[in-house]
Amino acid sequence: MSDRTTIEQRIYLGNRAKEVIENEAYIAAFESIEQEIVEQWKKSPARDEAGRQSLWQYLQMLSKVKATLQTTMETGKLAMLDLEHKQTLRDRLRGTFSRAA
């Protein structure tokens, strides 16, 4: 996400990331892929450095995808808190000015 995304965009993307992270099919697919990579690594001969390196890179990419979705979800949660805080401040200011009038 760029620095130019709006609060609403961060909330939207955070909610979409949450839907993916909590989706049973996503969870099952990631666990299956991760397990398959680890099993292939365990079965690979020690002399197959290139193959083992590729498997390690696959595992790192899988972790990166998970981490990116998690970060997007957390960013959305923080954006929601920020929006709620700003709304609370606006409501307080309106209340203060309406009582003064």
Image (cartoon, rainbow, N blue to C red):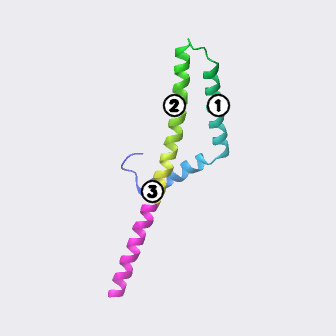
Give the CA separation, mark 2 to mark 1.
13 Å
Q: Is residue 40 visible?
A: yes
Q: Position of residue 23 (x, y in %)?
A: 64, 47
* Residue that numbered label 1 is attached to: 35
Q: Give the mark nearer the N terminus: 3 vs 1.
A: 1
In the rendered view of the protein, which quadrant contains the N terminus? top left
Q: Which mark is residue 78?
A: 3
Q: Which residues are magenta?
A: 81-101
Which three-letter amino acid code belongs to the residue tagged 3? Answer: Leu
- Is disc 1 placed on a helix, strand or loop? helix
Q: Position of residue 32 (x, y in %)?
A: 66, 33
In the rendered view of the protein, which quadrant contains the C terminus? bottom left
Q: Is residue 65 above or below residue 52?
A: below
User: Any magenta on residue 25?
Assistant: no
Q: Give the mark nearer the N terminus: 2 vs 3.
A: 2
Q: Is residue 51 above or below residue 73?
A: above
Of badges 3 and 1, the one in the foreground is 1
Q: Give the mark nearer the N terminus: 2 vs 1.
A: 1
> Residue 2 versus residue 67: which sits nearer the camera?
67
Give the CA separation, mark 3 to mark 1.
32 Å
Q: Which mark is residue 60?
A: 2
Q: Is residue 13 visible?
A: no
In the image, what residue occupies the spot 52% across and 15% down?
50
Q: Is residue 98 above or below residue 80?
A: below
Q: Are marks 2 and 1 in contact (CB under 8 Å)?
A: no
Q: Position of residue 34 (x, y in %)?
A: 61, 32
In the rendered picture of this protein, how many numbered marks are placed on residues?
Answer: 3
Give the CA separation, mark 2 to mark 3.
26 Å
- Is disc 3 placed on a helix, strand or loop? helix
> Residue 56 versus residue 23: which sits nearer the camera?
56
